[in-house]
Amino acid sequence: MKSRVLSAVAVSALATAGLLSAAAPATAAPLKCATGYFCAYEHINFTGAVLIQSRAGRGARVDAPDNRTSSGSNNTGNQWVGVNIRLGIHDDVYKWAPYTDASTIPGANDKIDFFDVK
């Protein structure tokens, strides 16, 4: 019984002194998009699920999970255009120039239905 009380006192003292602390929760590190690929990510700052990882060329249409893209990385020589379909009308909502990244996509977050490669 004495050893349990002493253990509790020791843990309490260490915690008070700041020597015993809970581990900080792990955060997802941004994923790197490979050279020659376009990558779309579920969350801002290139985190979350990789929704698209494509080497599609000019003239291609690349489907994406509807309304989930929040960031993207274009490591290709083509322009990638995020398109939203609203009431049957295709609306270009965000454009990635060749070799550019967007850690956020203001005005287009969670609105992209597919990508046109130009």
Image: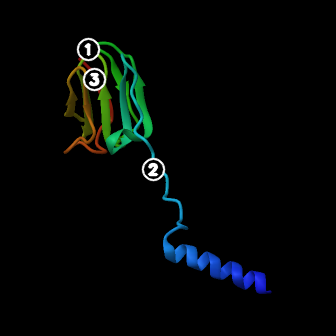
Look at 49% across and 57% down and name the residue there.
Answer: 25
Contact between marks 2 and 3 (CB within 8 A): the answer is no
Per the image, the residue denoted by label 1 is 77
Per the image, the residue denoted by label 3 is 116
Q: Secondary structure at mark 1?
A: loop
Identify the mark nearer the N-term, 2 or 3: 2
Q: Secondary structure at mark 3?
A: strand
Q: Quadrant of the N terminus?
A: bottom right
The amino acid marked with disc number 3 is Asp
Q: Position of residue 76 (x, y in %)?
A: 30, 17
Most foreground residue, 81 or 31 = 31
The amino acid marked with disc number 2 is Thr
Q: Where 65 falls versus 1 (above or below)?
A: above
* Drawn side of residue 43 relative to residue 58, left or right: right
Look at 38% across and 17% down and name the residue there.
Answer: 55
Q: Residues within 10 Å of mark 3 (few under 14, many from 20)?
A: some
Q: CA distance from mark 2 to mark 3?
A: 32 Å
The answer to which image quadrant residue 11 occupies is: bottom right
Q: Secondary structure at mark 2?
A: loop
* Front disc: 2 or 3: 2
Q: Residue 33, labelled with which disc? A: none
Most foreground residue, 104 or 93 = 104
The amino acid marked with disc number 1 is Gly
Q: CA distance from mark 1 to mark 3?
A: 14 Å
* Drawn side of residue 103 relative to residue 92, left or right: right
Q: Position of residue 16 (x, y in %)?
A: 51, 77
Per the image, the residue denoted by label 2 is 27
Most foreground residue, 54 or 113 = 54
Q: Where 50 falls versus 59 (above or below)?
A: below
Q: CA distance from mark 2 to mark 1?
A: 32 Å
* Front disc: 1 or 3: 1
